Image (cartoon, grey):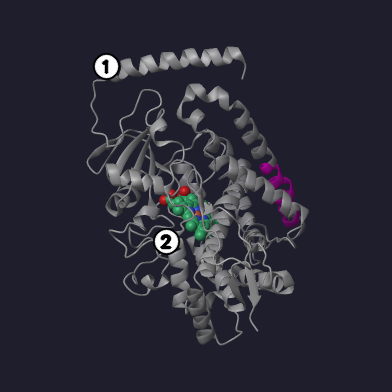
Amino acid sequence: MDLLAFEKSLIALFVAVTAAIVVSKLRGKRLRLPPGPIPVPVFGNWLQVGDDLNHRNLSALARRYGDALLLRMGQRNLVVVSSPSLAREVLHTQGVEFGSRTRNVVFDIFTGKGQDMVFTVYGEHWRKMRRIMTVPFFTNKVVQQYRAGWEDEAGRVVDDVRADVRAGTEGVVLRRRLQLMMYNNMYRIMFDRRFESEEDPLFLRLKELNWERSRLAQSFDYNYGDFIPILRPFLRGYLKICKEVKERRLQLFKDYFLEERKKLSSTKATDNSKLKCAIDHILDAQKKGEINEDNVLYIVENINVAAIETTLWSIEWGVAELVNHPEIQQKLRQEIDDVLGPGVQVTEPDTHRLPYLQAVIKETLRLRMAIPLLVPHMNLNEAKLGGYDIPAESKILVNAWWLANNPSSWKNPEEFRPERFLEEEAKVEANGNDFRYLPFGVGRRSCPGIILALPILGITIGRLVQNFELLPPPGHKKIDTSEKGGQFSLHILKHSTIVAKPRA
Ligand code: HEM
């Protein structure tokens, strides 16, 4: 940033402040906006509330201002929804009105301005993408086709950990091996491929680029340029890095996965009776002219972040809670032994016969939601919510974590207690049948991956607990479960060392 640009920005800032004051005085139309802290010109509430609008800070604001509150973040309107009835309104009753997505300057880059499925506005393109992705990814047939693969991958994790003597004594960072497993679970579906080891060079490049993408997108560092457009020149360097990462990443998907698959299907006679992998279906849609090559790449992009990271974080949280609650871990182990018999390895159909396992997973997703604010929604046009006017193109955050952790509707919500899902909350499912519990959202923009995520979580956590005693490392009573939030993600801050002591 040179001096001239800096001076220009200061002048522009001054002009914008003056203009904002004049416009606000002259504006005739009075909207009945949701309550919130009083904004100042240009910055809005940004200086008062800061950058880190995580689920906990937002629930504190909701307690002060109410279940629908408005924050002005520079030029952007942010509406935070914090009650089950208003969540129903946004996600269900007015699902079309609030069914779009906001993208900030960084998400614009990573999604090619919404050429993907997750971040596109509600409309024709979204409908087409969701339809095209459903058959290859989001049906029970897919679960039945791939569950043996997921069981195999979880079995390999168990074998590798068992073979590593350190794992049973000083401990290992279990997450690293689970990450390889999650990539394999999804790459089997997508490309009928897997990576042999954590050192596989292609896996390492992929992992690195996905990590960079998530870090850059979830960071708060670029907020100022997103909230206050005239400050955007200062973001030039950041956005340049985003563009480079995006290019390199899409090129990697193209060169090493898409082209490979195209070659394979042109040499092999692909008759329809043979099982296709997901990308074959997606390429068929491209051949028919329904989508273009960029859309295909963005589908691969979406699966890499939406599917792999979220499920991995949830497994990691589940393991962490079980390490820190040995009595719950033992009760789960006992259930598996009792229902399956000692040594019989958990498979997908078994997970339906293991109510305590299901309860442990639900409780993990309640207390440690991977996407605690859902993926931000947006209303394209001015709308009404709870009697308030919501300006067009507001970013709508549904604080799903607070809905599931509000002491006025849950008994001791801060406690990790799976029993609640067998007792007072026995009717509550993860599919959104209760607006207090929406780990996957609900309605039009809800997570279609729930159908894959739940069995993968069940198989993985089940296998780990039935084969190992999971403990904190020597000298520690518990592992650290501090949280790290991003723009809308939540994961464990430290990838802890865990002792996995093989059962005799
Ligand atoms: C434990 C794992 C997972 C959690 C907690 C999770 C959670 C979520 C949440 C909260 C949303 C946003 C809902 C909303 O905005 O209303 C979402 C959207 C989405 N998820 Fe997941 N998800 C998980 C796994 C997966 C998997 C395995 C896949 C794919 C195989 C997937 C694909 C998607 C897609 C494509 C969307 C965007 C839907 C749309 O905009 O129409 N997710 N997920």
User: Could you tell whether 77 is left or right of 203 in the image?
Assistant: left
Majority secondary structure in the magenta region: helix
Relative to 473, is 405 above or below? above
Q: Nearer the viewer, mark 1 or mark 2?
A: 2
Name which quarter of the figure residue 280 lies in: bottom right
Question: Residue at point 77% right, 53% down?
Answer: 201
x, y (%) of residue 494?
58, 55
Determine which residue is flagged by label 2. Answer: 366
x, y (%) of residue 29?
24, 24
Element marked by disc 2:
helix
User: Could you tell whether 31 is left or right of 229 in the image?
Assistant: left
Mark 2 Cα-neighbour bin, 10 Å: few <14, some 14–19, many ≥20? many
Question: Residue at point 51% right, 48% down?
Answer: 129
Does 402 appear in magenta? Answer: no
Task: Say which of 18 and 504 sits in front.
Answer: 504
Name which quarter of the figure residue 149 lies in: bottom right
Does 259 appear in magenta? Answer: yes
Amino acid at pointer 1: Leu
Would residue 280 be visible to someone looking at this image? yes
Question: Residue at point 61% right, 20% down?
Answer: 1
x, y (%) of residue 195?
72, 60
Magenta segment boundaries in residue numbering: 249-265
Question: Residue at point 57% right, 37% down?
Answer: 112
In the picture, the quarter occupied by the C terminus is bottom right
Determine which residue is flagged by label 1. Answer: 26
Relative to 68, is 318 above or below? below
Mark 1 Cα-neighbour bin, 10 Å: few <14, some 14–19, many ≥20? few
Do residues under tags 1 and 2 come within 8 Å of each other at their CB atoms?
A: no
x, y (%) of residue 300?
61, 49
Would residue 95 be visible to someone looking at this image? no
Relative to 178, is 204 above or below? above
Amino acid at pointer 2: Arg
